[in-house]
Image: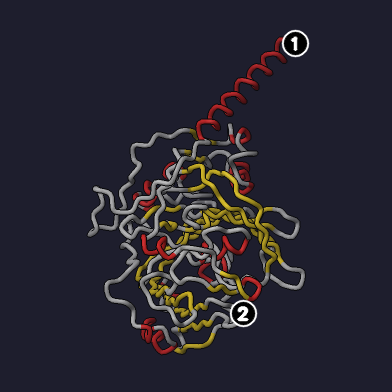
């Protein structure tokens, strides 16, 4: 009897302590967007100093206590990470800082919702605005993510990594130029989202394998156009299969084409449902991670969690379930979109039996020299193989991405002939 009573007291104390922690966390507060560079920022460098470096850790969640928070703070994918990697996975939780911003020109253009057309495959609205400032359905959130402000004329390079369970790493790198049309600073009369050319620079066996994609604002009326350059034949060919669940060889089967940047491309293979707005712990204000050398970040099973920051965030949760008459290797996806920045912060994928296959994170920072919130990488954790992919890495370790070049890209570059020149 005494033992049972003691266990009951311990349980009640632990539960009460957890509830107190939750009460402390649940004060998300008002938005305080950072609209200009902080004093420590050096525009000549490739560093983004942490505006919140004095913040203390409010709570650390690990395998010992995650069950206390699974019902009201964690996602299914995060719970699976604790189950799969109990010795190493943890989440350091900090004060919620609603610091995301966009250029004032974007908010000035945002007055009302755009209009979805062709069953959600297209939209009509004020170019450069937030398409759906008052979202009411699933595809509103998807389009807000796709058309969030993310620069104008862009140039940059970034590494990508496949990390195996034994800690060994496969390394690659690429270079890209892009032109976005959905922004206040570019005349858009072409009905396009944008154009991008990218090429692999590492490893040597794939070097100069290059891709050109032209994406329209209506995948039904004008499907994606894509071309690839093969360095062995020195030829450019059309590539209509660069879409949906096509898996580029460099990804080693871990991610699909339409998972790039969270989600992209046509939406017709899924039924889309808005689950609701929730408060969940999300990777946010990941400045500490951005500033660390990459060799300190790549650890077996998952990135080094000592340097990631999690905050309680209002997220719009969207479910995508495969239509009965369509095919895709991912039967179900659950997406978590930040209500402030519209970035996808987390995605979870499920098989036909609704068993989770992968957990994906997109930690963001405010690139306050723009200002603009985007992810510093895409991390995909595959539970079957226990490998993970880190791609689109932005870090103080690599040259800074140029988000708005002083001299705009010549649109004539974004042609099959231009792709050949870019590849060389």
How far from the left and from the top, in percent, is residue 270?
68, 67
Q: Is residue 244 visible?
A: no
Q: Is residue 265 above or below residue 77?
A: below
Q: Is residue 243 above or below residue 112?
A: below
Left or right for 361, reference 419: right
Chain-order first, disc 1 or disc 2: 1
Label annotation for residue 1:
1
Label annotation for residue 351:
none
Label annotation for residue 220:
2
Q: Quadrant of residue 103?
A: bottom left
Q: Nearer the viewer, residue 26 or 283?
A: 26
How far from the left and from the top, in percent, is residue 62?
55, 36
Left or right for 159, reference 1: left
Please tell me whether mark 2 sits on a helix, a strand or a loop.
loop
Residues under labels 1 and 2: Cα distance? 69 Å
Question: Residue at 35% across / 66% down in the picture?
Answer: 403
Left or right for 49, reference 419: left
Question: Residue at 34% across / 64% down in the picture?
Answer: 401
Q: Is residue 305 visible?
A: yes
């Amino acid at each position: 009897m005494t033992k049972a009573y003691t266990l009951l007291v311990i349980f009640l104390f632990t539960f009460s302590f957890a509830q107190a922690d939750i009460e402390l966390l649940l004060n998300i507060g008002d938005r305080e967007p950072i609209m200009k560079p902080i004093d420590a920022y050096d525009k000549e460098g490739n560093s983004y100093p942490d505006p919140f470096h004095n913040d203390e850790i409010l709570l650390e969640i690990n395998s010992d206590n995650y069950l206390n928070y699974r019902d009201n703070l964690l996602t299914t994918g995060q719970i699976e990470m604790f189950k799969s990697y109990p010795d190493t996975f943890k989440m350091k939780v900090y004060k919620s800082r609603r610091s995301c911003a966009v250029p004032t020109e974007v908010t000035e253009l945002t007055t009302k919702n755009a209009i979805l057309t062709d069953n959600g495959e297209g939209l009509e609205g004020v170019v450069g605005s937030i398409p759906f400032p008052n979202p009411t359905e699933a595809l509103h959130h998807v389009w807000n993510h796709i058309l969030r402000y993310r620069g104008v004329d862009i140039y940059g390079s970034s590494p990508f990594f496949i990390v195996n369970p034994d800690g060994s790493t496969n390394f690659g790198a690429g270079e890209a130029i892009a032109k976005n049309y959905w922004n206040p600073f570019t005349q858009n009369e072409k009905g396009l989202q944008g154009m991008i050319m990218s090429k692999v620079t590492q490893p040597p066996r794939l070097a100069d394998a290059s891709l050109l994609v032209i994406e329209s604002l209506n995948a039904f009326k004008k499907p994606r156009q894509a071309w690839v350059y093969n360095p062995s034949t020195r030829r450019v060919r059309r590539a209509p299969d660069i879409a949906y669940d096509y898996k580029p060889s460099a990804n080693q089967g871990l991610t699909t084409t339409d998972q790039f940047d969270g989600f992209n491309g046509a939406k017709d293979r899924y039924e889309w449902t808005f689950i609701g707005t929730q408060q969940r712990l999300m990777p946010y204000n990941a400045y500490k991670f951005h500033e660390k050398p990459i060799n300190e970040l790549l650890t077996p099973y998952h990135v080094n969690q000592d340097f990631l920051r999690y905050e309680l965030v209002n997220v719009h949760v969207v479910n995508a379930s495969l239509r009965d008459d369509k095919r895709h290797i991912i039967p179900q996806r659950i997406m978590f979109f930040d209500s402030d920045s519209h970035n996808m912060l987390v995605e979870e994928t499920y098989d036909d039996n609704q068993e989770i296959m992968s957990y994906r994170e997109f930690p963001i920072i405010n690139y306050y020299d723009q200002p603009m919130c985007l992810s510093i990488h895409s991390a995909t954790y595959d539970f079957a193989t226990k490998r993970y992919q880190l791609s689109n890495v932005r870090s103080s370790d690599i040259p800074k991405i140029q988000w708005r070049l002083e001299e705009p890209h010549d649109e004539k570059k974004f042609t099959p002939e231009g792709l050949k020149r870019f590849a060389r």
